[in-house]
Structure formats: structure tokens, C-alpha cells
Image (spheres, rainbow, N blue to C red):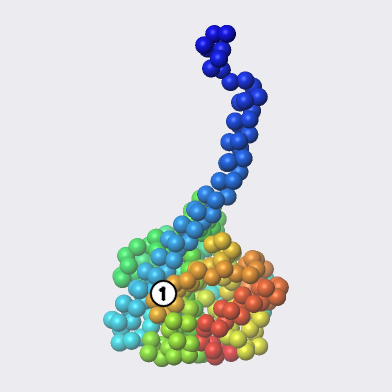
Amino acid sequence: MSRKQQAAFTLIELLVVIAIIAVLAALLLPVLARSKAKARSIVCLNNLKQLEMSCHLYTADNNDFLVLNQAGGFVGGPSNTNGPSIESNAVSWCPGIAPHDLTTDNVKNGLIFPYNKSAALYHCPADRSTVDGHPDLPRTRSYCMDISLSCDSSRSTFHKFTEIRGPAPSDLFSLIDTQEEDIWDATFGIFPTGSVWSGYWLDLAADRHLNGANLSFADGHAEHWRWKARKIFQGVWWPAYSDDDLDDLHRLELHVKPDVMN
């Protein structure tokens, strides 16, 4: 037998090697995908921390007043199948309507933009949604601000940082990943536990980070929350669709001003 023949692989040996590679790939690909998802979540958390810091700097420069959090869309009632209306909200932490904004102009016109100077911070890297009618144009914003904070559309909201006592700043959520089919203006509407509407999502949290969302809190820290149920958009102002979804909603409601929109 020649040296060349001795070094050759048989067909069976090649098939065994290919099978082993396929098995290893099947084992490794989910791990790699999870690692990428974790990395995107870390970037998102950093975005929220920096935006939250920008809010604190604004408050420090404005005699303790929180940055304005003006709503630009309103719905008529629960289980409303129509989209929210559009109203001017030019003076806000981030004006504009996320599904409609073709440029970062509204982000840059926001009251906290001078404190960060980065439009990229307003977009979650795991958010693959695009501008309505422009399937190749990524949206400029993925986050909304809790209606508990300086929202004139609510009859009860904190206007100054020193007013935040119940819940404490470390327990009051400020910014949140918002579900891409539900995001509209930059205000996140939510009812407190105890409200007649406490079983309804007025705005819907996202679940694009390993079935969870990232949130910042009024004291400046950010957290990843894993949900019990997938966040499925069913319409504007819609009831929780399962017991697990309701548990997720009630968990979030514990971290807003108790009498907001009650």
C-alpha cells in the first residue's frame, strides 16, 4: 500500500467527522445566540443608565424639577382597536412618535439630549422594528418614560425629584423597554395597583431580552426583569391575557406612583 493510500480517509470516517461537527454546532449555536442576546441586553442597560443620568443632570440644572414627560398620543378607552391620536409634544424629554420618526431630529430636540449627545442611546440594540412604511429604516427610539414622572397628561405625577418618596427613587421605575408594536409617544402609561384599570396594559412592556425587559429607576440604577409571560400586543388599553401576564403587570404597577391615573 502506498503512503498516499495510507493517509487517506475512508467515506465512513469522513461521515463520522461531519456528524461530530454537526452535533457540536447544534450544541454551540444556542449558546452563541444566548451570548449575543445577553450582550445586547448589557448594551441596552447601559443606554438606560446613561439616559437616566441625563435626566438627573437636567434636574440638577433646573432647581429640582424633573424633565417634562409629555404624552403625544391618547386612546379613547379600554380594548380600543384604533391607534392613539397624535398631539404636539415638542417640549419633552424626547418628543416625536417612534413609528413615524424618519430621522433622529426629535431625539436631538429632546430636553435631555444636551446631556448625552448620542442618538444611539435612545435605541435598544435588540429592537429590530422599523419606521412605518419604511421597512429598511430602523426606528430611532425604543424606550418610554413612566407616566409617574412629570407628565401633565396625568392628574397625579411627581414634578420634583424631592417629591419622590412613595415609592422611593430606588423603587420607582423611570424608563422602560417598550414593546415595538405598542410604542408610540415617549410616555409609558400604566395604572397603579388598586385602580379599577389595574388589570389592563395601557402601554405594553417589551420582552426582547430573553423574555424580559430592561428598566431604569429614579435613583439612577437599571435592572433586567424577566417576565412570566410573553408580551403579546393585542390592542391599545388591553387586559392582561393570562394569570402570568397579570402577575407581570402587577409587579410593574408596584413601582409607579400609587395614585397615578387612579
The residue beneath circle 1 is 221
Residue drawn at x 54%, y 62% as measured from the top left: 209
Is residue 104 at all visible to an observer of this figure? no
Name the amino acid type tagged 1: His
Residue drawn at x 36%, y 66% as measured from the top left: 108
Residue drawn at x 51%, y 87% as measured from the top left: 257
Is residue 253 at all visible to an observer of this figure? yes
Q: Quadrant of residue 121?
A: bottom left
Q: Residue furthest front?
A: 1
Residue drawn at x 58%, y 50% as measured from the top left: 30
Q: Quadrant of residue 202?
A: bottom right
From the top left corner, tell me how far across and down residue 185 is, in percent: 50, 71
* Vertical order, 232 against 21 (above or below): below
- Residue 83 horizontal side relative to residue 119, left or right: right
Report the front residue among 40 and 195.
40
Image quarter where the C terminus lies is bottom right
Total number of numbered discs in the rendering: 1
Image quarter where the N terminus lies is top right
From the top left corner, tell me how far across and down residue 123 is, in percent: 45, 62
Q: Quadrant of residue 75?
A: bottom right
